[in-house]
Image: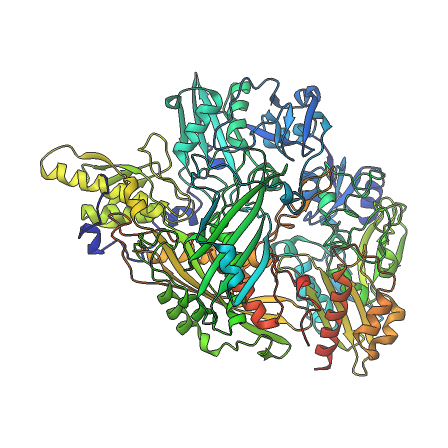
């Protein structure tokens, strides 16, 4: 049997130190990692269990925001009264994802780090630059209906599957981490996820062993919060396109897209077009889109969905 | 008992227990987790080891070498079986592809090895260590590309009917008709996606083999194992009392059964093997994709003068076509007719039977075409169908239907569903941003007669014990069989014990083609009647008998089941998201043996029809180095979830068919899927004004095409 060692970390810094070695992985809810290990898509040699670190509180920050511990389960985060009142887009995004059972286990930090659902990534017989760097991409000329349309590279067109992360991108969250040397830093969510480029296996800004300890939301900005997820069935499916929007009374606001890129997709400059409607926003938001024949519809779908969201926000 | 003439009044007609909506007698065992499914038979034989199947990494070619040394050296590994050490294996006639590859590989994920180990985890892990080298060969994976090479399949024993059938002069009548429709429709490859994956435990005792498995047809399983191993049938026992869904996927033994048996032989101890979910799509069978060409021609008054339905499908060499034109031979009138099937060679995994093979995909095309034609004529779709009803086999007018109440199904359904509120002009009914539409389709599925036997015993405690190798694949066989025995033997239902799914019991019809309920119960009826007369004569308290049907019975009159499906959908005017809002099925299928379990069957089938309409598609990667179904898990191959299925209703017409069997019942489980997808498609058109002829109707096929 492919063996791995396991330890339960006592402190965040100790966890980071333990996970510094190549082949080590954190495990929290295990909703993604365990499935991938069964298929040998992921083959960690050492698991560092972070469940006992106590990072499972949602606290108010002095700035008027919320600090969400990395181990807060998706169900608890979505149900939190402060989140539902002040950051409703986040609540709505979370409950649009996965199933009740999975949300009960999945954690905040783990959700940010969940891996793509590209079919070729899951099939270990097929080339995949994300799974085996340099082996090639099966999806670009293959079955790519679900794949990314923007920010793609010649190495990878995989899409980030998270709903939660899309809402956090719209909310300008920051990710707090601790490094193996015990130092901590904050990473704006915009810089947290990477585009595939030539290294699609490198998905985030985290260094070896670096552990997410919390995600912080800035103080609430009001507005109407909408998360519209479009998918092939009405539950338990990944987004074809999703829109996280916060729309103010004067028509200004923020918008982030899911299901279109290797990361939650937001272009702040495009938001100046919000009062001019969905077409104008989408034109700038997806200006660099390079869809495949199979997923070209996502560009139009993004515009139509945003249009529906903006109409809803007015009503 | 030979069933040679129409049934007269008999004990079933009392309907004291048969026909009542009683709860499933196996319900408590299933809801408490005590009904043992194949993989959970920990108790039947000691010392079970675990097998894990290695599938081919290529779609077509040759295995040039297999290195099992690392796998054999892995912890806990007991044996590794490949074609090189499996011994001589024959291919059963019911299989197109071999269950174990080597040296030729016929399709992606075809089994190339089974690794047997002490634990499941050890077996799974060691399976990854089997090193197989291949010489990849070019294959054919694209049906649309291969249609030019397609040929009419040769009639064989399984389907002796000629693949192309004609009546009158279709071309002439079509050319001369004042109103015509000429359209092409496509349906994709689909997966059974049943809840319980294929699973088996195999044990050898000397040269005798026992397989506890998940299988719909026990006697076929015995036959095919015997053929594969070239041993007599009486050395094989197959046991399958509970099956977690089949839909045709478990009509024949699959690689789990064969490789469990091979693994058990090699390891010298019992072995259990289950297919992992990602293996279901490519290692087993699927419903083949079709390209269907439908031409209809009518007089100005809407009467069909010419009807043609041709279908193209693909399969591995030696495989069968998807018989998508069968219903068109029988469903509507018309003096000039043409039906034809053509088969292309594809190197995809084996295409085979899936719930209502033929009619399910065939009606997906025909029943859109009927709506399109009705619109051309300016006639209500139901009226158009009524106008072209026939009470006789249109190909052989001297052959009547035993029962045909299609018109009544449509009329009752229209009334209950509120069809009169439908706006015939598409795209006119709005609720906020949603466009609302209604659609309907006729349902049709033949009723098949199969020999079926049973043994019935009255014990000293007054219990009636029924034994037959019939299976219950979630359909309710246990319950309807118990109802039949209780009715005939005049005992309460709780005095009947039903034992199923064991090849040591008399051979039944098995479960498939919606033939299970009527035929299996008729076999039990025959045995009970025999037992009753034996007891009356003071004879033995055990009797075995069968029901069998002379050929003339099926040939003299046509036995089919009929229905009508009604669907209301909404289409989001902005995003094109489609939601089904209401569904109704009206079924005329002979006597309904248990309205409760029949209703579950039909509701399940309607749900599967929604899946086929809106989301189910095995996506084929047709590139030379690929050639397989890409979305091979339940995250990629989506089936409806609860939230996709709203209120569903089912109405059964009060009907008996004295020519079907002493039960006067017919199949209904597959009737429930037939026509549903077209009704959804027709509702989407009525809502949005966008006519989609390529299933599944995903939102991208509507997006941007709605006229405002």
Look at the picture and state if B542 lies above or below B177: above
Q: Position of residue B175 (x, y in %)?
A: 54, 60
**Image-based side of B597 in relation to B700, left or right:** left
**Image-based side of B478 in relation to B531, left or right:** right
Can you name the residue that lies furthest to the left here?
Answer: B537
- Asked where in the image residue A170 lies, by quadrant, the reply is bottom right
Residue B678 seen by the camera: no
* Colour mapping: rainbow
Q: Nearer the viewer, residue A7 or B416?
A: B416
Q: Nearer the viewer, residue B60 or B295?
A: B295
Q: In the image, what residue occupies the spot 89% across and 56% down?
A: A185
Look at the picture and state if B651 lies above or below B146: below
Look at the picture and state if B464 lies above or below A257: above
Q: Position of residue B208 (x, y in %)?
A: 42, 20
**Image-based side of A177 in relation to B483, left or right:** right
Look at the picture and state if B238 lies above or below A195: above
């Amino acid at each position: 049997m492919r063996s791995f060692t396991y330890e339960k970390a006592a402190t965040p810094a100790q966890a980071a130190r333990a996970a510094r070695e190549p082949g080590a992985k954190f495990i929290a809810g295990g909703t993604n990692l365990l499935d991938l290990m069964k298929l040998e898509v992921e083959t960690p040699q050492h698991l560092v269990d972070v469940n006992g670190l106590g990072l499972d509180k949602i606290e108010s920050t002095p700035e008027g925001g919320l600090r969400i511990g990395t181990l807060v389960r998706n169900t608890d985060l979505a149900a939190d009264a402060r989140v539902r009142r002040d950051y409703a887009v986040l609540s709505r995004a979370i409950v649009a994802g996965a199933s009740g059972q999975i949300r009960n286990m999945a954690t905040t930090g783990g959700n940010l780090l969940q891996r793509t659902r590209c079919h070729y990534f899951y099939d270990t017989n097929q080339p995949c630059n994300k799974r085996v760097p340099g082996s090639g991409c099966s999806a670009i000329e293959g079955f790519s209906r679900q794949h990314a349309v923007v920010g793609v590279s010649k190495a990878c067109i995989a899409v980030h599957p998270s709903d939660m992360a899309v809402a956090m991108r719209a909310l300008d969250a920051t990710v707090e981490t601790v490094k193996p040397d015990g130092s901590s830093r904050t990473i704006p969510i915009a810089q947290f996820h990477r585009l595939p480029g030539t290294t699609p296996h490198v998905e985030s800004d985290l260094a070896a062993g670096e552990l997410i300890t919390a995600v912080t939301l800035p103080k609430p900005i009001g507005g109407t919060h909408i998360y519209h997820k479009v998918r092939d069935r009405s539950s338990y499916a990944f987004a074809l396109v999703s829109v996280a929007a916060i729309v103010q009374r004067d028509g200004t606001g923020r918008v982030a897209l899911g299901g279109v890129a290797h990361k939650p997709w937001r272009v702040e400059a495009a938001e100046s077009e919000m009062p001019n409607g969905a077409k104008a926003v989408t034109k700038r938001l997806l200006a660099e889109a390079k869809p495949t024949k199979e997923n070209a519809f996502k560009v139009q779908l993004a515009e139509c969905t945003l249009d529906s969201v903006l109409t809803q926000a007015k009503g | 008992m030979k069933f040679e003439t129409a049934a007269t009044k008999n004990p079933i007609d009392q309907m004291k227990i048969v026909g009542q909506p009683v709860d499933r007698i196996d319900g408590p065992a299933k809801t408490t987790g005590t009904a043992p499914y194949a993989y959970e038979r920990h108790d039947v034989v000691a010392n079970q080891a675990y097998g894990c199947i290695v599938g081919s990494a290529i779609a077509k070619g040759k295995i040039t070498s297999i290195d099992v040394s690392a796998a054999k050296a892995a912890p806990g590994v007991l044996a590794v079986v490949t074609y090189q050490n499996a011994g001589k294996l024959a291919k059963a006639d019911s299989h197109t592809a071999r269950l174990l590859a080597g040296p030729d590989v016929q399709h992606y994920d075809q089994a190339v090895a089974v690794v047997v180990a002490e634990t499941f985890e050890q077996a799974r892990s060691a399976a990854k260590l089997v090193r197989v080298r291949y010489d990849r060969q070019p294959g054919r994976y694209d049906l649309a590309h291969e249609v030019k090479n397609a040929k009419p399949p040769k009639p064989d024993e399984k389907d002796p009917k000629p693949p192309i059938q004609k009546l009158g002069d279709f071309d002439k009548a079509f050319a001369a008709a004042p109103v015509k429709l000429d359209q092409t429709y496509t349906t994709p490859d689909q997966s059974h996606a049943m809840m319980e994956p294929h699973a088996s435990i195999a044990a050898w005792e000397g040269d005798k083999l026992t397989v506890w498995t998940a299988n719909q047809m026990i006697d076929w399983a015995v036959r095919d194992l015997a053929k594969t191993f070239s041993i007599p049938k009486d050395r094989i026992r197959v046991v399958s009392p509970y099956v977690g869904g089949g839909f045709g996927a478990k009509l024949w033994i699959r690689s789990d059964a064969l490789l469990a048996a091979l693994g058990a032989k090699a390891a010298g101890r019992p072995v259990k093997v289950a297919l992992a979910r990602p293996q279901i799509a490519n290692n087993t069978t699927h419903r083949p994709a079709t390209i269907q060409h439908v031409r209809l021609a009518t007089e100005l008054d809407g009467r069909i003068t010419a009807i043609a339905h041709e279908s193209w499908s693909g399969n591995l060499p030696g495989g069968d076509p998807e018989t998508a034109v069968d219903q068109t031979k029988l469903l509507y009138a018309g003096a000039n007719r043409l039906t034809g099937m053509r088969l292309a060679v594809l190197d995809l995994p084996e295409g085979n039977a899936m719930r209502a093979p033929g009619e399910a995909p065939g009606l997906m095309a025909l029943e859109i075409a009927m709506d399109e034609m009705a619109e051309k004529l300016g006639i209500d779709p139901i009226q158009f169908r009524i106008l072209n009803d026939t009470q006789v086999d249109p190909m052989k007018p001297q052959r009547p239907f035993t029962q045909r109440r299609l018109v009544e199904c449509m009329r009752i359904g229209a009334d209950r569903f509120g069809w009169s509120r439908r706006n015939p002009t598409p795209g006119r009914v709005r609720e906020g941003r949603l466009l609302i539409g209604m659609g309907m389709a006729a349902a049709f599925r033949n009723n098949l007669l199969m020999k079926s036997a049973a043994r019935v015993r009255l014990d000293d405690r007054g219990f009636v014990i029924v034994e037959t190798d019939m299976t219950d694949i979630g359909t309710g066989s246990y319950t309807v069989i118990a109802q039949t025995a209780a009715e005939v033997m005049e005992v309460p239902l709780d005095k009947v014990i039903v034992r199923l799914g064991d090849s040591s019991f008399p051979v039944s019809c098995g479960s498939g083609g919606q033939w299970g309920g009527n035929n299996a119960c008729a076999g039990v009826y025959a045995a009970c009647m025999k037992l009753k007369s034996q007891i009356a004569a003071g004879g033995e308290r055990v009797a075995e008998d069968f029901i069998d049907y002379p050929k003339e019975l099926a040939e003299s009159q046509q036995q089919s089941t009929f229905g009508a499906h009604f669907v209301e959908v909404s289409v989001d005017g902005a995003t094109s998201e489609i939601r089904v809002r209401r569904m109704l099925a009206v079924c005329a299928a002979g006597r309904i043996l248990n309205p409760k379990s029949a209703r579950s069957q039909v509701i399940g089938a309607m749900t599967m029809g929604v899946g086929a309409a809106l989301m189910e598609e095995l996506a084929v990667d047709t590139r030379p180095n690929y050639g397989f179904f890409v979305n091979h898990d339940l995250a990629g191959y989506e089936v409806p979830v609860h939230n996709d299925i709203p209120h569903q209703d089912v109405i059964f017409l009060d009907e008996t068919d004295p020519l079907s069997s002493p039960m006067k019942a017919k199949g209904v489980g597959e009737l429930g899927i037939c026509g549903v997808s077209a009704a959804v498609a027709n509702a989407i058109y009525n809502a949005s004004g966008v006519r989609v002829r390529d299933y599944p109707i995903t939102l991208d096929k509507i997006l941007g095409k709605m006229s405002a």
